[in-house]
Image (cartoon, helix red, strand yellow):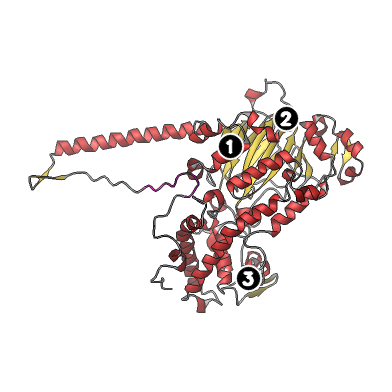
Amino acid sequence: MEQSATRSFLYNCIPSERKRPKIGRGHLCQRGERIMRLPLLCQRGGRRMRLPLFLFQFILLTIISAAQSSSTESKEQECSATNNESPLQHEVSKCTDVECIATAIATSQSFFDDYFEQKSLLLHVDPSALQDIKMDWNDVVELATKGLTWGSSTNGLRLASGSGEFISSAKVGGQAFDKSSIEDMPVLRSQLEGPSAITGSTLQIGAIHTLDSGAADVVRQFQRIFGHVANGNLYVSSPGLDTVAHMHTDRMDGYAIQLSGRKRWQVYAPIPVAHNPIWGVMGNAEWGKETGKSIPSDLVGEKLIDVVLEPGDILYVPRGFPHTTSTLMSAEKEGEPNSGPSISFTVAVHTEAHHLVYEKLLRCTFARAGYCEQSIPSSKGKYCPIGLTLTNYARSKKGRPLRDSLPVGFLNEGGDWFSFVRALAHKAERLMKSVLDMAEEKGVVGIEHLLDDTEKLDKELVNVAGRVFHIQSQVLEALEETFAGSKKGNNTPFAERQKHWAQLFGRIGAFTGNFCHEGGSNVLFMDYFSPELEEDVLTKRIR
């Protein structure tokens, strides 16, 4: 397929500046390459003179020495950053509230360059800065006895055994405990007298921002400042558990905030084929959770961090990074007094979980441009002919950028439409061309007449990009209406608030409904379930 001789429609919509900006809020950083040429020839009096050999050797040795010095300094800075002496740590250490903490992270260029979707990061703040979410056991019991559904595997209040396996019922205070227990609140409250009631277990309250106004304020700050959907989960774990959560991955970027007690976190790098997993392309895009099976050690990469969080610690864990937690401390902690149960609060920030990745952007664009008109029937419904090509390319090493997050919210420098398009244009068009080339090479049926007509494809890319950019603020506002303290949230029965938020979370977004295709998800995503598509290695191993 011949490449279009003219710049695409998408590129005609943006300013003439062609250099791709560094994404991220804060200062736009355009670093041009500095080329230093060795002056072997110089001009003197109109005559060209060659430098003496000894002088050339002296200059060369000077440059090498400077480079080595720079390399040593860089390594020292890297080590310093690992020990929390980074500029970001300096900024958050001055914060007195969560708004300041979230702003410092979201506007940090070093966070975007070195950590976001790349590796975990440990920060520490004064515990007094976390007063909005300061919870003790009595606060937990107060929420637990207001009518929540217990023993549920969905978002809600649940118990976990020490093995990390979530179960549908458990014993609390030595008595059988399940969903029926909520019918008798006084009995339930008596069972929860004191943290010892959950010995050997972990208590979790999901979507706590729909239940507690303090938690709602914290999640609201993260959601507004990061410009992405967020939610909060609370975890209460008894001390001495060898496993609180076994090895698993999540579809969101997690900011684990330790409120009281201690919890050990071990975070690992993902194996290359599972880096930045996305739903559909790689099963459910998270493993070791729904199945109750831990991820095997040969399917995780190197250990990145092994740390015991204490009050005031905040740990960033990128989406898709395998991790495990426990409250059984290391040997050097054994002599210290029992710190009581671990109470931690995790703010989950969703990019991929709301489909804000390049693969979904291109999938929607292809569908709107007519590439799904001759849908292929299968046992589970019709699917888009180019869908399998897109999915397989997204799994490949070359197609890995398809799994990256779109420059939405804090990832969009400047926050305006032009900044968004400028950050997205080059990458989206390059990936689109690669998918089309692959489809032509494989002889994909049903799209032959479209391969040489890129004008409509370019225009639809602009339409889809516009939808992503403009709908995001509406999504955030709609979800905030379900938060505790909001008018609609307060009018929703307490026991229904978590469910209400979860349902809206799944229904709202840029690629929902019939915007991409009149057949909706019945066509757009069906190739994920095609018998022609083999399962990815993690989904195949972890059932």
Q: Secondary structure at mark 3?
A: loop
- Type of amino acid under label 3: His
Q: How busy is the neighbourhood of tag 2: few (under 14 within 10 Å), some, or many (20 plus)?
A: some
- Residue 199 visible from this viewpoint: no
Residue at position x 64%, y 38% from top?
256
Q: Which mark, residue 57?
A: none
Please, is residue 101 above or below residue 397 in the view?
above
Q: Marks 1 and 2, Cα distance to the nearest angstrom?
A: 34 Å
Return the residue at label 1. Answer: 100
Q: Secondary structure at mark 1?
A: helix
30 magenta-colored = yes
Please, is residue 482 above or below residue 528 in the view?
above
Quadrant housing residue 342: top right
Q: How busy is the neighbourhood of tag 3: few (under 14 within 10 Å), some, or many (20 plus)?
A: many
Between discs 1 and 2, the one toward the N terminus: 1
Between discs 1 and 3, the one toward the N terminus: 1
10 magenta-colored = no
Magenta-highlighted residues: 23-31
Return the residue at label 3. Answer: 517
